[in-house]
Image: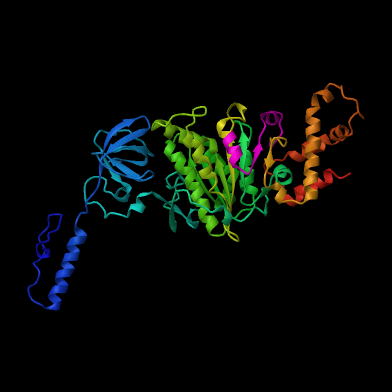
Amino acid sequence: MIANAEKTSGAEAVTPAPTGTHTGEWHGFLKRCGEAASAAEPFQRSGTLTRVTGLVMEAMGLKLAVGSGCTVIMPNGDRVEAEVVGFNGDRLYLMPTTDVSGLTPGARVIPWEHAATAPAAGGNMPPRRRASDRVRRFPVGDGLLGRVLDGAGCPLDGLGPLKAEQDAPLANKSFNPLDREPINQILDVGVRAINALLTVGRGQRMGLFAGSGVGKSVLLGMMARYTSADVIVVGLIGERGREVKEFIEQSLGPEGLARSVVVAAPADTWPLMRLQGASYATSIAEYFRDQGKNVLLIMDSLTRYAMAQREIALAIGEPPATKGYPPSVFAKLPQLVERAGNGVKGGGSITAFYTVLTEGDDHQDPIADSARAILDGHVVLSRQLAESGHYPAIDIEASISRAMSALISPEYFEQVRGFKQLYSRYQRSRDLISVGAYSPGSDSLLDRAILLHPQLEAFLQQSMFERAGHADSSAKLSALLAP
């Protein structure tokens, strides 16, 4: 009976219900019942940690959906943040995002619906949330501009707490492809070789394919400084921690950082944090696109994202397939990439550049091959050009922009084709020319290629502190090939 209700915390019993019909007495009684109910501890679901093997933790006693967040609380009050990455029967597979040192058998596993505000040691638990809130949400909004965050949405720059107006999940947002606006506007990236010969459009997804040490970070920095975009979102995923500060200070600079959001999940973070970092950077870009802004998303690198997924998949028992990569890796890549692109007609856009590391300069690497198929073009950086002092080391012959034909006029497209023909003809005959085995007059196209080769080489090269606009680049190309 309600008259016998007691506080679950062990406090004094609620005053018995009045026996009369006086309205004031009943109002007071109901108020006291409400206070008692608000002070009661709700039923708290929790599980038990049973096993930790390598990167994976196993828990029993809970049923949570894949992707749900949870916290492992140890007897001393320390906690480890984790996420559900799989299950087997009544066992949950958890992947940590923080250090697991000090974990002991039997530690409590609390769903994230409570864990976000759970006390460090003892005390009442907060009220239960809806099941939809068990998925972790991350801050987004204009308050993130100029900030540097980790893969969990926590600031790394020491500038205080974030002033984010909203939050968003990391889940992949479904987008009807028929609702997307076509790629029909040229994007000026400030790099002459790309603007003139590999024209990029707003909403295009491009790959930068390169081995280590051939200048892809320098090229990304140039595009971050010079690209015509309202907002820049940079995801530094799985790369060297040293490069994070260098990219911010040298590539972006104070002016570039003011309109940028940087999400950094370096190589020494847990694989789940690297996955989260890439998804979080994309979620931030989606927020600004939905506000009608043109966003430049730079992610370095897509290969490290794939490697992080491989570590997780192999740890929970998924069988390897192509060169050690499980099938889930090749399912995750398009899910991430397809989130970028144009929004609805008249809305914003996300133009994305993903770096793809070609290990050993092998462009048939499984990740490189898969990325090439799902992107809207690729810019290949050549080690041979980089070693010869040619910067940016863009291999024009191996690079392509699949949206270029819809962005430029047929007359200009013929000029681009003529440039590539001259450049390619010279490269194929370089050995003959260098040893004097070629007789001038034998091939009129090659004769012109030899005559223009110094100008072609100079056109493709550019200082990292020089900006080359699209209009200026196109005019120079036309003047170079004029009869």
In the figure, 36 relative to 269: above or below? below
Q: Position of residue 259 (x, y in %)?
A: 56, 53
In the figure, 19 relative to 472: above or below? below
**Region in magenta:** 369-392
**Residue 128 in view here:** yes
Quadrant where the N terminus is found in the figure:
bottom left
**Residue 469 in view here:** no
Q: Is residue 475 left or right of residue 78?
A: right
Taking the view exactly as shown, the residue that stands out farthest to the right is 441
Q: Position of residue 132 (x, y in %)?
A: 36, 53
Q: How is the image coloured?
A: rainbow
Work out whether residue 77 or residue 169 is closer to the camera in this orientation and state it: 169
**Residue drawn at x 78%, y 30% as measured from the top left:** 427
How many numbered discs sit on the rendered protein?
0
Instruction: Indicate the quadrant where residue 289 lies.
Output: bottom right
**Residue drawn at x 90%, y 25% as measured from the top left:** 439
**Residue drawn at x 25%, y 47% as measured from the top left:** 45
Taking the view exactly as shown, the residue that stands out farthest to the bottom is 22
Q: Is residue 164 left or right of residue 243?
A: left
In the figure, 368 relative to 474: above or below? above
Instruction: Indicate the quadrant where residue 39 lies.
Output: bottom left
Q: Position of residue 33 (x, y in %)?
A: 16, 65
Taking the view exactly as shown, the residue that stands out farthest to the left is 19
Work out whether residue 171 or residue 136 is closer to the camera in this orientation and state it: 171
Quadrant where the C terminus is found in the figure:
top right
Residue 376 magenta:
yes
Q: Is residue 352 left or right of residue 43?
A: right
Q: Position of residue 385 (x, y in %)?
A: 70, 31
Residue 366 magenta:
no
